[in-house]
Amino acid sequence: MPFYLVKTPALFRWLFPSCVWRIPNKQNKIFLTFDDGPNPTFTRKILAILKAHEISATFFCIGRQAQKHPELLNEILASGHTIGNHSQTHKNGWKTTTVDYVNEVTDCARIFTSSLFRPPYGKITPKQVKKLKRNYKIIMWDVLGADFDFLVDAKKIETNITKNTQSGSIIVLHDNPKFAAKMLEALPLIITNLKEKGYVFSSIDATLLHP
């Protein structure tokens, strides 16, 4: 079973202060994000749910996926959402040289442009951060749905998120065919419950990062 923390501890934010872990605001905004797409089956289902609930989100897309499905990038943007760079082939930064890692990000940027970058697996070294922060806002998270864990069901995904979200939270889910089905089952309930708590969903953009 993989090790992970549903709620990101303050220590992580202290160790990587130049990364964005949450976005404090006075409007009770929260930020729903989806990693690993776009995927022709599941991306459109996510977009339909977001449209039905009239909310916006941010999609961190893998370059090779975007290359295969450029029409999906257009659909994401046309629906009022934001896209971010999630590298070209989803390499683990802890197992990749800084040069190769930066090249992964650059290769993805040739497919589509964004000032936002999220490290695959959330794994990035201080040297990689130093290089990339010159041109990107490195977007991490403070709430993990854990939809990638095969032992976690839709109800647990929903509980992980609704119990740990606060104003400014950046929430991670995955647009990945390996586990998107249970995420899609959980998503409407997540949105409904968080709306009932008074939260406002927003996409991540430069205005929010530089109020």
Image (cartoon, rainbow, N blue to C red):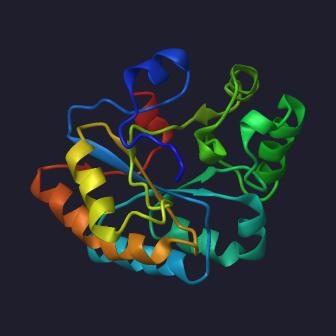
Picture quadrant of residue 168: top left
Q: Is residue 172 above or below residue 166?
A: below
Image quadrant occupied by the C terminus: top left
Residue sitting at x 25%, y 63%? 191
Which one is in front, 15 or 46? Answer: 15
Q: Nearer the viewer, residue 33 or 163?
A: 163
Residue drawn 20% across the image and 39% down it: 27
Please give the name of the residue rendered at 78% of the width and 53% of the height, measured from the top-left corner.
Answer: 108
Q: Is residue 165 left or right of residue 203?
A: left
For residue 65, side relative to residue 10 (left or right): right
The image shows residue 40 at horizontal and vertical percentages of 61, 81
The answer to whether residue 186 is seen in the rendering is yes
Would you place residue 98 above or below residue 32 in this image? Answer: above
Query: Looking at the image, can residue 47 be seen?
Result: no
Q: Quadrant of residue 100?
A: top right
* Residue sitting at x 67%, y 26%: 133
Name the outermost residue toward the front. Answer: 1
Q: How many badges with numbers are in the image?
A: 0
Q: Position of residue 162 (x, y in %)?
A: 22, 52
Residue 21 at x, y percent in the picture: 44, 32
Residue 117: % across, % down: 63, 42
* In the depicted structure, whether residue 43 falls above or below residue 167: below
